[in-house]
Image (spheres, rainbow, N blue to C red):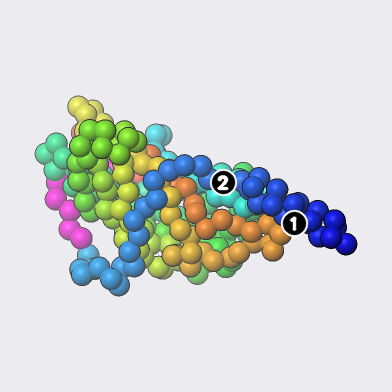
Amino acid sequence: MLHHSFSILLAASLALSACADVGDAPEAETTAVESIESTSETTFSGTALPLNPDNSAIEWTAAKITRTHNGGFNTFSGVIYLDGETISGIEITIDAASIFSDTDRLTNHLKSDDFFDVEAWPEARFEATSFEPISEGLDGSGATHTVTGTLTLRDQTNQIIFPAIVAVEADVVSADADFLIDRQLWGLSYPGRPDDLIQDEVRIWLTMNADRGIETGPEEEQTTD
């Protein structure tokens, strides 16, 4: 009996030690929007440049005990605001129903009310409002700026702060980021099966590129389809 119990504990320990994970990335500092002093609509300065659908992407990695899953969103639109030679803001609207993953079964589950509930909440939004330069080599990640913004999923909005590589060049403006968020903070609380629990950490990759010389208003934003 003692040997049997030890075998169960050993098997459980090995299973936990062999858990899949999302990999290493900085964790976004997250604050509920109700705790932020001002939640008024942001007005950005500068020229609105539409995201280039050919080289912009919103991708994610999530994990449960048995495996890691990768995915993203196929359809989103947005602009990067350029004030002189400085990015002053980014606005992105995401079609929640365009979420995809590496299995059809998971994709369909993500669209249900266990996760994104895309029928009730068809849009997600990201808005970046601040880009603070980082001293070279300060965090070891190669990031050039600390970005502050808000992310809205399932009609729940949190402020997030994360590092990014921001570049303003002669023909293109770009912002690339790789960071972790806690899905529970946006009401994505489905735990998974008792023997295959889902991690709370989700890794987000943002690849945002806009061509200079192309201007747009919010009503003219382009989609990535």
Q: Quadrant of residue 114?
A: bottom right
Of the two numbered discs 1 and 2 on the same chain, state the one appearing first in sequence: 1
Queried whether the magenta region covers residue 125, the answer comes back as no
Q: Residue at x 31, y 44 (%)?
A: 163
Q: Which residues are magenta?
A: 42-51
Q: Residue at x 38, y 62 (%)?
A: 152
Residue furthest front in the image: 2
- Looking at the image, which is closer to me, 143 or 69? 143
Marks 1 and 2, Cα distance to the nearest angstrom? 22 Å
- Confirm whether residue 206 shows in the render: no
Callout 2: SS: loop
Dot 1: element: helix
Q: Report which quarter residue 124 is drawn in.
A: bottom left
Q: Amino acid under label 1?
A: Leu
Residue reaching furthest bottom?
Answer: 34
Foreground disc of the pair 1, 2: 1
Query: Crowdedness of circle 1 by 10 Å Cα count: few (<14), some, many (20+)?
Result: few
Residue bearing mark 2: 21
Which residue in the rendered view is the most extreme toward the top? 170
Q: Could you say which is closer to the camera, residue 71 or residue 12?
A: 12
Q: Determine which quarter of the picture holds residue 175.
A: top left
| 200 relative to 4 in the view: left or right | left
Give the side of residue 58 with respect to residue 79, left or right: right
Residue picked out by circle 1 = 9
Observer-nearest of 197 and 172:
197
Q: Count the numbered circles shown.
A: 2
